[in-house]
């Protein structure tokens, strides 16, 4: 039985090359305008690896007969899995309704009608979210009637460290969403 989709040397149909891939253009859904960075993915993967060892320890403890200790270990593994999932969720999300900055413990949503401007600025930024600051670029949202800007992205966070082009594309995308959905004053 030939499996042409598994071979690299199969003949492609010339008519199928011109067709566009299906694209879900639903702007009502919250979406991240960039891919999670390698630092964030590695941290989540390590947390999930630790959780897998904790689950293996839970199984061994349960087989040994110490069910209360197995329950504690199972709960701790569940917390580590939830931390890993939340770590992957952190970032900036956009939709037709506004822009959302998801942090580890808190989420801030700003409707496009309250956004005065979104622009990239040079300023001291936190390196990988740690207290140490370095000079870098940040995508900043200025809200109407509020003096303090909201930093959406930086080029030294876990998504864009050593990925300047990805930061520029993500910043341009968020600025384009702002230009498209902010009501004209």
Image (tube, rainbow, N blue to C red):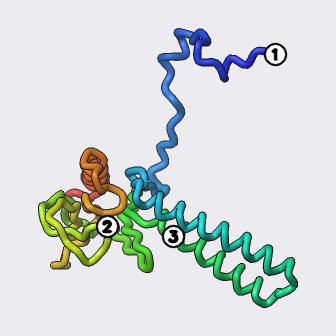
| The one of 179 and 3 positioned closer to us in this rendering | 3
Q: CA distance from mark 1 to mark 3?
A: 45 Å
* 153 on left or right of 31: left
Q: Is label 2 in a helix, a strand or a loop?
A: loop
Q: Residue at x 61, y 12 (%)?
A: 10
* 71 on left or right of 23: right
Mark 2 or mark 1: which comes first in sequence? 1
Q: In this figure, which residue is indicated by the disc labeled 1? A: 1
Q: Is label 1 in a helix, a strand or a loop?
A: loop
Q: Is residue 18 above or below residue 121?
A: above
Q: Is residue 10 above or below residue 44?
A: above
Label placed on residue 173: none
Mark 2 or mark 3: which comes first in sequence? 3
Q: Residues within 10 Å of mark 1 (few under 14, many from 20)?
A: few
Q: Is label 3 in a helix, a strand or a loop?
A: helix
Q: In this figure, which residue is indicated by the disc labeled 2? A: 128
Q: Position of residue 90 (x, y in %)?
A: 43, 66
Q: Quadrant of the N terminus?
A: top right
| The one of 163 and 16 positioned closer to us in this rendering | 163
Q: Residue at x 25, y 58 (%)?
A: 155
Label placed on residue 86: 3
Mark 1 or mark 3: which comes first in sequence? 1
Q: Residue at x 47, y 64 (%)?
A: 43
Q: Position of residue 113 (x, y in %)?
A: 29, 65
Q: CA distance from mark 2 to mark 3?
A: 16 Å
């Amino acid at each position: 039985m030939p499996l042409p989709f598994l071979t690299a040397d199969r003949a492609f149909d010339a008519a199928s090359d011109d067709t566009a891939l299906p694209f879900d253009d639903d702007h009502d859904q919250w979406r991240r305008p960039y891919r999670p960075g390698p630092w964030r993915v590695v941290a989540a993967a390590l947390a999930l690896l630790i959780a897998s060892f904790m689950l293996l320890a839970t199984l061994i403890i349960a087989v040994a007969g110490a069910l209360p200790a197995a329950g504690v270990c199972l709960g701790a593994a569940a917390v580590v899995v939830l931390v890993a999932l939340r770590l992957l969720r952190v970032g900036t999300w956009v939709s037709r309704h506004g822009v959302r900055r998801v942090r580890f413990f808190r989420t801030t949503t700003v409707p496009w009608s309250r956004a005065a401007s979104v622009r990239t600025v040079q300023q001291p930024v936190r390196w990988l979210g740690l207290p140490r600051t370095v000079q870098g670029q940040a995508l900043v949202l200025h809200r109407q009637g509020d003096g303090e800007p909201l930093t959406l992205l930086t080029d030294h966070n876990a998504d864009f460290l050593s990925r300047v082009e990805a930061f520029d594309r993500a910043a341009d995308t968020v600025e384009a969403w702002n230009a498209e959905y902010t009501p004209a004053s």
